Amino acid sequence: MANISDYRIATLGSHTALQILKGAHDEGFKTICVCKKGQEKLYKSFGVADEVMMLDEFANFFELEEKLIKKNAILIPHGSFVSYLGWEKIRDIKVMHYGSKGILEWESDRVKERQWLKAAGLLIPKVFKTPEEIDRPVIVKFHGALGGKGYFIANTSEEFYDRIKEYPGEAGFVLQEYIVGVPIYMHFFQSSLTGELEVMSFDKRYESNADSIGRIAAKDQLDVNIRTSYTITGNIPLVIRESLLPDIFTMGQNIVKESFNLKDHKTGKPMEKGLFGPFCLEAILDPDLKFYVFEISARIVAGTNPYINGSPYTWLKYDVPMSTGRRIAREIKQAIESGRLEEVLG
Ligand code: AMP
């Protein structure tokens, strides 16, 4: 029987690395953390990385690839990995990669992810093609914006043209209907070995300054001309109304089902393995309890970080603290031990 001691779990030191490495350790794997120079001390301090490799920049990842291949490393992608390398470069990775690379293109492209969400029958915020069409509050999202920084709200086309002057360098943006409700981020895990979908956890984001504007009276906000921004600073754990779970589960199942119809841009054919592993639906829940899904992440999300010790939902199913990072490692371990590793790589 193939043994997990022949492999290493590796990831970049950022985003959900601590959780991934800890989870891999808990499942008995040796681990490698690829760190940016200067950050290695921090990553070593938690004791979850057996080995630390260093890079000047994450974008130079390929300098280390041979070394990782020699160590039989299995690389776990996460949000920083996708944003530093981009889905196109990820396709060139030769080291073993957990998850479907082709799917990352779909989640990284706002137009494509919308097609996917729509085809899966999910409710999505309306998108306005031109500022002239604005007939309700919209959130203006710049293509290059990282972590929600620099978005703004406009209620009319006049307001849009007035505000956009403050962003002279920004070329591409989407005008998305602003949904008034509460943000809920749903974390799932789709097992390629059992074909089952698992609800892992939920979070909401802690965004600056959106989450602190309520601490200032409306008059003061106007007086000092405060603009809302959605810069992500952290994640807050959340338990949702149990009566919402059946809908959430169905949404997750539909997304997975539809992923088998998505075409791989390289081959032009539908992706055989579809979406598997961790993924997240990002939604606003309105007062009528309708979920408007505005984004999908087809990999582990940082919102799972509050649950390194497991979530209330994973505690129902597992008798050990099961984080999403650990769930990934367990899947890989079971795949190795049953001779099915190929099925979880992409
Ligand atoms: P994003 O970068 O797309 O994840 O969005 C950043 C933040 O903006 C989210 O966490 C929400 O708080 C908010 N947001 C994004 N899209 C919408 C929307 N369509 N309606 C209301 N709020 C939104």
Image (cartoon, helix red, strand yellow):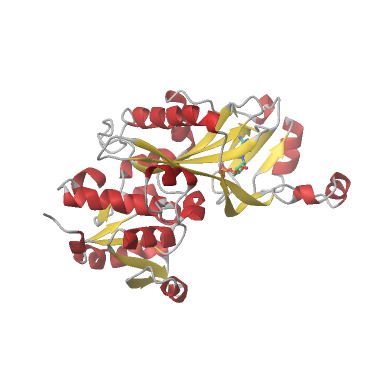
| Front position in the image: 342 or 221 | 342
Q: In which quarter of the image is residue 257?
A: top left
Q: Nearer the viewer, residue 161 or 319?
A: 319
Left or right, residue 282 beside residue 32: right
Residue 177 left/right relative to 94: right
Of 267 and 205, the residue lying toward us: 205
Which residue is farthest left?
Answer: 1
Up-down relation of residue 306 to residue 108 (above or below): below
- Residue 13: x and y in percent read 42, 64
- Side of 222 relative to 272 (left or right): right
Total label count? 0
Residue 180 placement, left or right of 69: right
Give the quadrant of the C terminus: top left
Quarter of the image where one finds residue 85: bottom left
34 in relation to 307, above or below = below
Residue 117 horizontal/vertical position (percent): 46, 29
**Residue 234 point in image, percent of width and height:** 58, 55
Residue located 83% across and 48% down the image: 221
Q: What residue is drawn where x is 20% and y is 59%?
A: 4
